Amino acid sequence: MARRHLGASLASVTKALGQWEAGWRSVQAEAKGPGAHFSKPEHWDAFYEKKARATTDPRAFEWYLDLDEAGPEVIAALRRSPAPTLNPIPHPNPRRNLNLDDLDLGMEVLHVGCGFSGLGAHIASGLGPPTRVVNVDAAPFVVAEMQNRATTQLPKELLKRCRWESWDLGTTPAAAAGHKASYDAVVDKGFLCATLFGGYGHAAVCLWGCIEALRPGGVLLQIAEDPPEQRLDLLRAALPSRSWEVTSTALEGTSGFTYYLYGCRHITGTLSSRCAVVSDGDMSGLVACIGIDAGEVVMEERAAAVWPEPNPFTIQRGPGVHLELAGDMYFTNHSFDPSCEVRFVEDDDDLTLQLVALRRIEIADAITYNYETTEANLMAPFVDAATGQPVEGWSETPST
Ligand SMILES: C[S@@+](CC[C@H](N)C(=O)[O-])C[C@H]1O[C@@H](n2cnc3c(N)ncnc32)[C@H](O)[C@@H]1O
């Protein structure tokens, strides 16, 4: 499948961060003091070796915030914003009752600059199967040590969904490292902070690695010590607002320090980015990628054609007026307890069909409407698998 443009490039990220250099570097230097070594993998390798020798405490070493402080915030943010991992669509048969329980709707998460942090395993455990987390770091010692510790300490089921790999984002592009466009979410706790000590060019390359690892519609979460007047502005400068929604939340640590959770969500630009087509290999259907409130438009599309008779792709507007669906709305399944209804919006000569939420829809809930309400006489009646009731249309009388 062709990859959609992320609305940013390494050059644009570097340029945007470069423009910050003069103003921000002085604030940074003042706040953090000199610390170029924090951006160097050799420093981290030595640091972690020392840490591992100094303590036999099996608990992970956490920067900034402990797991019970950072974990719930990160998991809540992931639940709010992910695009579920999508299965390929083997064949486009939308008919009619897809069993979502059989589908793999977990997230693929990349935990960058993981160090000794247990955040990756915490996310895998919190989101549950089949979510998988790949933890990467440029310091080979900590990667090997974490994989070893996980092998002896993590429950088998959790271990299957977590792994640790070496990846220096400053030197190896996402594609070369095998991570390009592979994740629904990238999570960074203190990673970009460390790379910023190596200068804006270096940080831009590392930030770009995170962006390139995301699938379209994915989310980058960062926990940082930098306050919004620095980091939020930097992210907004690096990621064009047209394509990215950037937010911040203050997190109060028990240490007395305030840290921040930054969320950068890639907006794919269409309403259909709110839902995705999934398939069990035989049937296809739509599921929500984000939480959607009652009354919100889930997706909309223009009628591709108007026919006097129904066909398998049509929704009836009135007697002898059947609007043909040509976009993703075609994949919507039928339900007698639907999550959405179809509305028509007329604008000059255009006729648009909208799917509107009838109730709150949670991530991975099915997007459905009641076919009995959208054609008087379905061209291909069928039996609803959930109720055993026939689905034929609202009238026995031919509509035309
Ligand atoms: C401040 S520590 C944070 C560690 C961990 N996330 C935590 O919360 O405890 C920064 C981490 O980023 C890693 N790092 C620094 N530069 C890196 C790079 N270019 N590529 C990958 N990891 C890097 C370091 O090895 C270190 O583990």
Image (tube, rainbow, N blue to C red):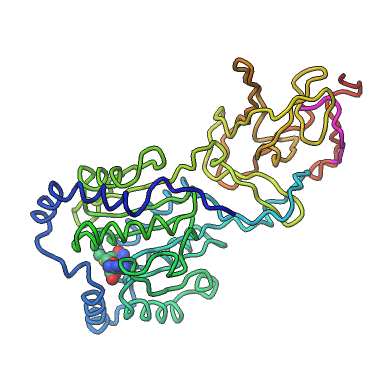
Q: Which quadrant would the C terminus be assigned to in this image?
A: top right
Q: In the rendering, at what x and y percent does residue 119 appear?
A: 38, 64
Quarter where residue 122 is shown? bottom left
Given residues 58 and 356, the one toward you in this image is: 356
Viewed as shown, does residue 391 lie left or right of 259? right
**Residue at the spot 56% in from the left edge and 57% down from the top edge:** 106
Indicate whether 279 appears above or below 63: above
Quarter where residue 1 is shown? bottom right
**Residue at the spot 72% in from the left edge and 56% down from the top edge:** 90
Residue 374 belongs to the span the image colors magenta: yes
Indicate whether 114 appears above or below 27: below
Q: Residue furthest bottom?
A: 53
Q: In the rendering, at what x and y percent does residue 33 appear?
A: 9, 60
Viewed as shown, does residue 217 lie left or right of 278? left
- Main secondary structure type of the part rendered in magenta: loop
Q: In the rendering, at what x and y percent does residue 147 appear?
A: 42, 78
**Residue at the spot 15% in from the left edge and 66% down from the top edge:** 36
Indicate whether 56 appears above or below 266: below
Please provide the residue range marked out in magenta.
Answer: 373-383
